[in-house]
Amino acid sequence: MAEKVLLIYTGGTIGMGRNPLTGALEPLDFNHLVESMPEFRQLQTSVEVYQFTPPIDSSDMDPRLWAQLVRIISDRYDEYDGFVILHGTDTMAYTASALSFMLENLTKPVILTGSQLPVGQLRTDGRENLITSVELAAYKDKDGHAMVPEVCIYFSGRLLRGNRSTKKNADGFNAFDTFNYPHLCDAGVNFDFHNHHILQPDFSRPMTPHFAMDPHVVVFSLFPGIQENIIRHVLDAPELKGIVMRSYGSGNAPQSPWLNGLLAKAAQRGVVIVNISQCVAGKVEMSRYDTGFHLKKAGVISGYDSTVEAAVTKLMFLQAQHSDSHIIRNLMNKSIAGEITI
Ligand code: ASP
């Protein structure tokens, strides 16, 4: 029997067309996409479609829509061998990271893909991205289990762990990478799976969906000249529960007493402050330099080699699950879906 894959079309460049009045690209109905792709009819895998109405530019993605994606997948989990989500590239790494936490013990592939050029254009990268994603979502190992039971991003010949991915190029076809984790599969003439890097869930246990995210978080970057009054307004916001602070190098920050004081005050009232690096590769080691060590003393925790997308969505996920900040801090220091290397 042919494998079955559910294709969830959320929007993004892949299905966009040009507005004749403004000349700008805007999301189109999925039927337009199917008409532009006769390859659909040649696929060995049976593909069914769920379409967001209206389709969105991924700049409009939010936690409510992540919950909708979790609902779509969990309600149909037993009917399909895998899931492909067509998504704009701009926030694809955030959605992939969020879903990796929200779909606990995932035993089937959930592959996000999209394209840099609409599928109707001659030089589009969308056809290959879409067709290969469907093939990967249907791929089984010799025991009949999904070959890649993870939330992934497939783009330009590479299958990447979703919560390790970052959009690195606004124009190039090779738009995503995982700077701190190897590829899960390279798709050339054949699929070259890197098995020992692929997560292995407990296939005897069910997948547990989670729908809640608590977005009371902020991300801020350090830079020379950062101003106390501006940061004070952010850190003193009473609704704030989590901070992702993008520091320098291996987790360093200026030694200004005001910054330390504000961070320590926030940490004392239970705000979870996660230190991640502004560098795309490498990890935070707060004990390496004195400029990192004083952050540790202020109550800032290490985000290790996390991407900003994984850190912020993991905080949202944990804040929705737990009210005790000690538990959240503890879980931020563990890999819960392969997102960090401890
Ligand atoms: N703005 C588009 C989006 O993220 C870009 C893309 O699809 O690549 O929806």
Image: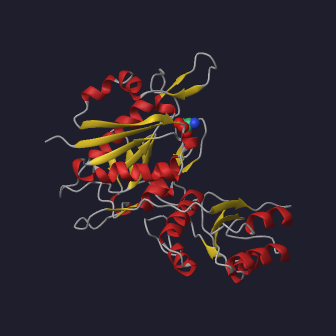
How far across and how far down the image is residue 14, in percent?
Answer: 47, 32
Q: Residue at x 58, y 70 (%)?
A: 304
Is residue 213 at least partly visible in the picture? yes
Count the marks: 0
How far across and how far down the image is residue 79, in percent?
Answer: 22, 48
Q: Quadrant of the N terminus?
A: top left
Q: Is residue 33 above or below residue 188?
A: above
Q: Is residue 175 above or below residue 146?
A: above
How far across and how far down the image is residue 90, in percent?
Answer: 57, 43
The furthest residue to the bottom: 297
Left/right of residue 191 with respect to residue 302 in the rendered view: left
| Quarter-of-image position of residue 39 | top left
Left/right of residue 249 with respect to residue 336 in the rendered view: right
Q: Residue at x 26, y 64 (%)?
A: 206
Is residue 227 at least partly visible in the picture? no
Q: Is residue 115 above or below residue 266?
A: above
The furthest residue to the front: 238
Q: Specify the quarter for ligand 1.
A: top right
| Quarter-of-image position of residue 184 | bottom left
How far across and how far down the image is residue 292, in percent?
Answer: 72, 76
Left/right of residue 261 with respect to residue 204 in the rendered view: right
Q: Is residue 267 above or below residue 316?
A: below
The foreground one among 189 and 41 is 41
Q: Residue at x 39, y 53 (%)?
A: 70
The foreground one among 297 and 66 is 66
Which colour scheme appears in the figure?
A: secondary structure
The furthest residue to the left: 1
| Quarter-of-image position of residue 293 | bottom right
